[in-house]
Image (spheres, rainbow, N blue to C red):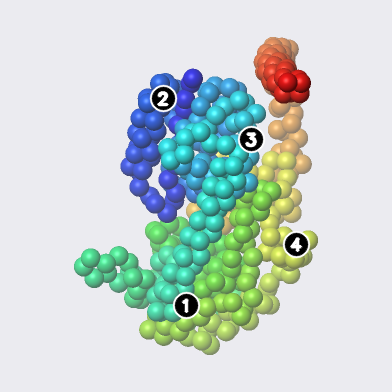
Amino acid sequence: MRAVIYARYSAENQRVESIEDQVEVCRRYAAAQGWPVTEVYSGAARSGADNRRPGFQRMVADAGARRFDVLITEAIDRLARNLSDTSAAFDELQFARITMHTLNVGLITPMHIGIMGTIAQMTLTDTQDKVRRGLLGRVRAGRIPSGLSYGYDLVPPAPGETDRGERHINPSEAAVVQRIFTDYVNGAAPQRIARTLNAEKVPGPGGRPWIDTTIRGQLDRGTGLLNNTIYIGQISWNRCSYVKDPRTRKRVARVNPQSEWEVKEVPELRIIEPGLWEQVKARQREVRIEMTPAPEGNELNGAHRRKFLLSGLLTCGCCVGGYMIVGKDRYGCATRKGKGTCENTKTITRPAIERRVLGALRSGMLSPELVEEFIAGLDEASAASRKDILGRQLGLQRELTDVTRKMEGVMQPV
């Protein structure tokens, strides 16, 4: 019986030793059963609600390839926090005729998956609610519920306390914030502002170079320097919520109704006067591009950049940044466009670069030698797949014969 171990700790825990502790107790469980441990899969600082964890995906793939016979984990919630993910993983294991054991239960059955998987998901929801309650409490107390905004420094916590969410104004950074707001009102675009600041070697948030998206953000979500209400002495929380799309497993942003926003006045943190703020809002409304609402009714999610054949695959030869559409059907350096820190002025039309790439693939990848190697690899993979399918068929036939024999025995007259 080849045993493997799966261990995970969540992003909230942030304790590396947790993985080692889980592996140790699982090894002792395997030793007590006389099972050799052949592999350890782990998910460090990854939420159980995310089924795209590399270690989890590798474990599922190896289960399909029948590389082990028993999966041991500390508890079901280490495998996943979502009931559907837990059930799907268990189905994969059962299909591969692999058993699952946890330390507190032992052999896991479908009944355990239904009950304990539901409890794990409810626990996750309860934890999320408590986190939101804690953030709400910080806002109501006039403390910042999120990270450190540009223009402010942390107030050192008292001895024995962690960060209390208190800030004070950083004068030099506050002057930059005022300059950005003023330049924008006077007609400068966020790209031009970012490029100017970078040319003057003015460090951006976190010491990084400025980029236009850092400045403009998204008006509806309240992101970006120009939309951060803390600059007018106002904490605005819960403007946007995130839900996970069950099909893609990706978080999707949804703007909450204004009635659900939590607003707290903190005038001691004001950097921008209300008049200047309103001028910025007025200009944003003037230059705003109206977005077409998505089918789901969320216009933010329908405003993504269009995808093309080579989108996300091209890099700049000077700064190794991405190459993106910077004009009408033309690729150019994204770093130069957004930050102005790259000297590469070369652009190329999308049809031209696609012709070059596809031509190179045809001439370089379709040589007889490479085609022969590809066919050989395909034949090998097909043979392995057929062998695996045949093995599963034989196993199911044996199970069917065994079940049929037992049914006939039960129906025999006494």
Label placed on residue 91: 3
Circles 1 and 3 in contact, beta carbons < 8 Å? no
The answer for how far apart the CA atoms under marks 1 and 3 are is: 47 Å
Report x, y in % for residue 91: 64, 35
Question: Where is mark 2, residue-wise?
Answer: 33
Instruction: Kindly identify the residue that appears in the image at 67 percent across and 44 percent down.
Output: 311
Give the residue type at disc 1. Answer: Ile
Q: Which numbered disc, 3 or 4, marks the residue closer to the eye?
A: 3
Q: Please name whichever residue, 202 or 40, is drawn nearer the observer in this view of the structure.
A: 40
Mark 2 and mark 3 lie on one chain; the one further toward the N terminus is 2
Give the residue type at disc 4. Answer: Glu
Mark 1 and mark 4 lie on one chain; the one further toward the N terminus is 1
The answer for how far apart the CA atoms under marks 2 and 1 are is: 57 Å
Q: Is residue 273 above or below residue 99?
A: below
Q: Which numbered disc, 2 or 3, marks the residue closer to the eye?
A: 2
- Residue extending furthest bottom? 275
Instruction: Kindly identify the residue that appears in the image at 48 percent across and 21 percent down.
Output: 2
